[in-house]
């Protein structure tokens, strides 16, 4: 579904990704862990071209993202993204946040899109917040609205960049359970996270990134219980 | 003593305002000054928007010229710009002086407005554009639906202040022979030989209108904060 081939990314002279290759299959949940600054966010952001790779290729359903002449906006509709800082649109209420893109891009009527938004809000556990503005919501509620907003475009894959890192501890659970609901429904997901419990529980595969490469990759059981790489071991000993 | 002051005051008022209907110079001047401010604000707003967009594009040439425009306008006195535009640019065309001055003030104001707009857009969190683009919205859709509405809240207060500055800056329109409020005071003073009374009169008028505009601006800002 997503294929990444030999991805390099530099910011000026700083080499952030130094040859990342991987393939993410339909229905798979891939968790990305690793120390801060190792390039996890940059890797994730290359998957929907929020960052332009310096070299290498990203294919979505066999179509190259980086090749010129492709309609990047169309391709991005297939890839939902959830940010650490939520990035809800503060001048729009919850309903408008969720319905904007489907109405503008999928030609949905307002009623259709609203019905769908109501369904999605119920799914993420926020049935009665349709007309609230984001600044009236808690962090956990904001992040669940952000998930609903991304789902409203019917993406084939969802990218999460540390979705719980900006939350107070008591709100982490509600966001993780909304994400687990997606896992149950078979959504393809790439999740950058520091929640090792979550990664171990729902991940089909764990990528450990360090200094711009995937230093180790394995099933959760193997990677957490039996890390092969010295750096993986030292990272895990610090976070577990 | 008090009688003497009152007597002097009423003389001044009589000579500077009432005799030969001299108040008409102030009324007519006020009209010109208001027109100049109004048209210059419109022209400045339009130029400012264009220059701001030019500065924010990825087009290096456009962005370079836009930034030079801002530098040059902000680096030279308005009165010099006004005279150059009047004598050099519009010398050969027979254009109404109000139009020429409005264009000159608009060109000047546009540079400041451009900076306001640019700063207002750049103050919108970067994550907003990323969230919009990640949903599949194009750059211009994201600007229109997400960035501009938020930027307007950052920009409006500064725009109000810009109009208030313009209002006061138009007092140099007499340099190209326009009979604005300032020039009106000078004409009256030339007749009455009063030391300063005509200037006091226009100072009051300038001040009163500034106070009204400031109050309107404050009301607008409070309204905007409520909708947050
Ligand atoms: N837009 C950018 N410009 C310059 N440097 C950046 C930019 N984005 C990220 N970096 C740098 O790239 C490195 C990797 O960042 P990131 O991918 O965010 O790491 P992680 O998500 O693993 O913490 C960091 O050193 C960061 O400072
Ligand atoms: Mg990160």
Image (spheres, helix red, strand yellow):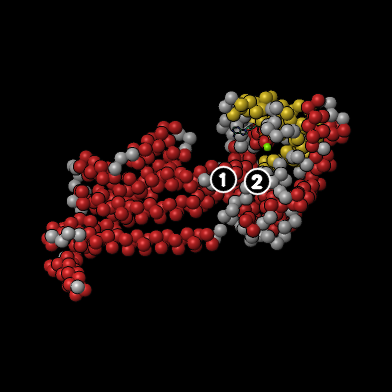
Residue A175 locus on image (x, y percent): 75, 50
| Frontmost residue, A119 versus B56 | B56
**Residue identifier under label 2:** A85
- Left or right: where A41 falls relative to B19: right
What residue do we see at 83% from left, 39% from top?
A: A200
Residue A66 placement: quadrant: top right
- Left or right: where A119 falls relative to A226: left
What residue do we see at 58% from left, 46% from top?
A: B128
Asked if the residue at tag 1 contacts the one at tag 2, i.e. Cβ–Cβ closer than 8 Å, the answer is: yes
**Quadrant where the N terminus of chain B is found in the figure:** bottom left
Q: Secondary structure at mark 1?
A: loop
What is the crowding at mark 2: few (fewer than 14 residues within 10 Å), some, or many (at least 20)? some
In this view, which residue lies farthest toward the bottom? B3
Pointer 2 chain:
A
Residue B116 locus on image (x, y percent): 43, 47
What residue do we see at 65% from left, 46% from top?
A: A85
| Frontmost residue, A72 versus A232 | A232
**Residue identifier under label 1:** B125
- Left or right: where B114 falls relative to B170: right
What residue do we see at 19% from left, 47% from top?
A: B94
| Frontmost residue, A82 versus B19 | B19
């Amino acid at each position: 579904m997503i294929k990444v081939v030999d991805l390099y990314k530099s910011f000026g002279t700083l080499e952030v990704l130094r040859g990342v290759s991987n393939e993410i299959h339909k229905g798979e949940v891939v968790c990305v862990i690793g120390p801060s600054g190792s390039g996890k966010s940059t890797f994730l952001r290359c998957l929907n071209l929020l960052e332009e790779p310096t070299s290498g290729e990203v294919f979505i359903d066999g179509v190259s993202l980086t090749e010129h002449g492709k309609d990047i906006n169309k391709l991005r509709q297939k890839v939902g993204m959830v940010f650490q800082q939520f990035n809800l649109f503060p001048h729009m209420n919850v309903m408008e946040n969720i319905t904007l893109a489907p109405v503008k891009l999928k030609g949905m009527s307002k009623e259709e899109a609203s019905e769908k938004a109501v369904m999605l809000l119920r799914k993420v556990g926020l049935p009665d917040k349709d007309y609230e503005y984001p600044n009236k919501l808690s962090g956990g509620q904001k992040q669940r609205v952000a998930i609903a907003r991304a789902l409203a475009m019917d993406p084939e894959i969802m990218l999460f960049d540390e979705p719980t890192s900006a939350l107070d501890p008591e709100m982490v659970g509600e966001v993780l359970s909304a994400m687990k609901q997606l896992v149950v429904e078979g959504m393809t997901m790439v999740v950058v996270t520091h929640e090792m419990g979550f990664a171990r529980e729902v991940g089909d595969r764990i990528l450990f990134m360090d200094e711009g490469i995937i230093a180790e990759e394995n099933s959760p059981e193997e990677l957490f219980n039996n890390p092969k790489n010295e750096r993986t071991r030292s990272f895990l000993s610090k976070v577990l | 003593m008090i009688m003497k002051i009152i007597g002097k005051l009423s003389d001044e008022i009589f000579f500077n305002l009432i005799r030969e209907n001299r108040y008409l110079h102030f009324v007519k001047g006020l009209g010109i000054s208001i027109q100049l401010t109004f048209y210059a604000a419109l022209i400045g707003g339009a130029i400012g928007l264009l220059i701001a967009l030019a500065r924010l594009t990825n087009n290096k040439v456009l962005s370079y010229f836009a930034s030079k425009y801002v530098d040059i306008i902000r680096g030279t006195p308005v009165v010099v710009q006004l005279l150059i535009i009047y004598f050099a640019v519009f010398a050969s065309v027979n254009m109404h002086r109000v139009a020429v001055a409005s264009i000159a003030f608009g060109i000047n104001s546009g540079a400041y407005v451009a900076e306001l707009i640019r700063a207002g857009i750049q103050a919108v969190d970067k994550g907003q554009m990323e969230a919009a683009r990640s949903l599949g919205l194009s750059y211009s859709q994201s600007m229109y639906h997400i960035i501009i509405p938020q930027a307007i809240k950052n920009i409006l207060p500064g725009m109000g202040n810009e109009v208030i500055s313009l209002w006061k800056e138009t007092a140099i329109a007499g340099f190209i022979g326009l009979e604005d409020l300032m020039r009106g005071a000078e004409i009256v003073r030339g007749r009455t030989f009063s030391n300063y009374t005509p200037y006091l009169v226009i100072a009051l008028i300038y001040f009163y209108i500034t106070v009204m505009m400031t109050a309107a601006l404050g009301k607008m800002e409070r309204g905007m904060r409520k909708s947050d």
